[in-house]
Image (cartoon, grey):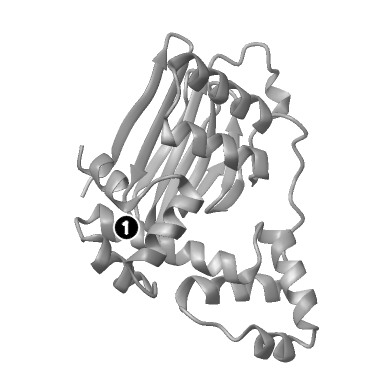
Amino acid sequence: MKRRAKILLSDPDLTVRLSWYVPGEVMAAHAHELGQVSVLLAGRFREMTDGRTAENHTAHIGYKPSRFEHANQYGESGALILSIEFGDNEHPADRGWNWQIARAEQIVLTKQIVIGEMAAGELRNSALDLAVSAMTGLVSDPQPTRWAIHLRDQLREEDTVDLAATARQIGIHPAHLSRGFRQWFGAPPSVYALRCRMSRAVQELADGQSAVMAANSAGFADQSHLIRTLKRETGLTPNRLTRFLAA
């Protein structure tokens, strides 16, 4: 299995690309000639630069100015990423490297771009809107508490976690647990767990498994549940994603 990419739009100063990075892939330190905005559609990965590390999971969005050196390490389920490379000469480097949880309007723009059911001019406009939005109002996310990190790791590894029991063990109210987790990871625990299962299913599809087998292996109730989840989160159906990965 190898990295795959499909160019959705290519202009002299703007390239939109959908890429699949295989599980465990490592990219040594490198830089892009153009500025880059990336949206993590499925999976997770770590990006490192200048002694700093960003741990990114599904529905994170990031910006890197041009010629910004960074390295990447992809998780055990790989990563499906939409990237936009564009001339950012008008945007000073002090806006800086940043990863954060994607906002609702950014997710809508991402789906529009991935689905691609628009003219080239509209696609370009949506891509530029998404790129600019990633550089607007950048803030650093607060650091999650130890219990939130532990719960996150549980949700990544287990299909079912008893949230009420977990809250009792920690000594907090279940509502506080859910609110706190959403604050730090951009989704309530149930949605985060579903996105983790979706990421495992995307890896199975990349390996050539059928949608039925991918749904079963990733812990979905059935194929229809996987189809609904994948389309809601990424705008893609398993068949369309499989065709892309096989291209």
Q: In this rendering, is residue 100 above or below 38?
A: below
Q: Position of residue 131 (x, y in %)?
A: 60, 27
Q: How many marks?
A: 1
Name the residue nearer the viewer: 22 or 239.
Answer: 239
The answer, for residue 76, to whether it is visible in the render is no
Name the residue nearer the viewer: 139 or 241.
Answer: 241
Q: Position of residue 242 (x, y in %)?
A: 26, 48
Instruction: Please name the residue shown 52% across and 19% down the image.
Output: 122
**In the orientation shown, which residue stands out farthest toward the top?**
12
The disc labelled 1 sits on which kind of residue?
Gln
Q: Position of residue 186 (x, y in %)?
A: 66, 56
Dot 1 alpha-carbon crowd within 10 angstroms: few under 14, some 14 to 19, many 20 or more: many
| Image quarter (top left, top right, bottom left or bottom right) of the C terminus | top left
Instruction: Please name the residue shown 55% across and 14% down the image.
Output: 87
Q: In this rendering, is residue 86 above or below 201?
A: above
Q: Which residue is mark 1?
A: 203
Name the residue nearer the viewer: 137 or 33.
Answer: 137
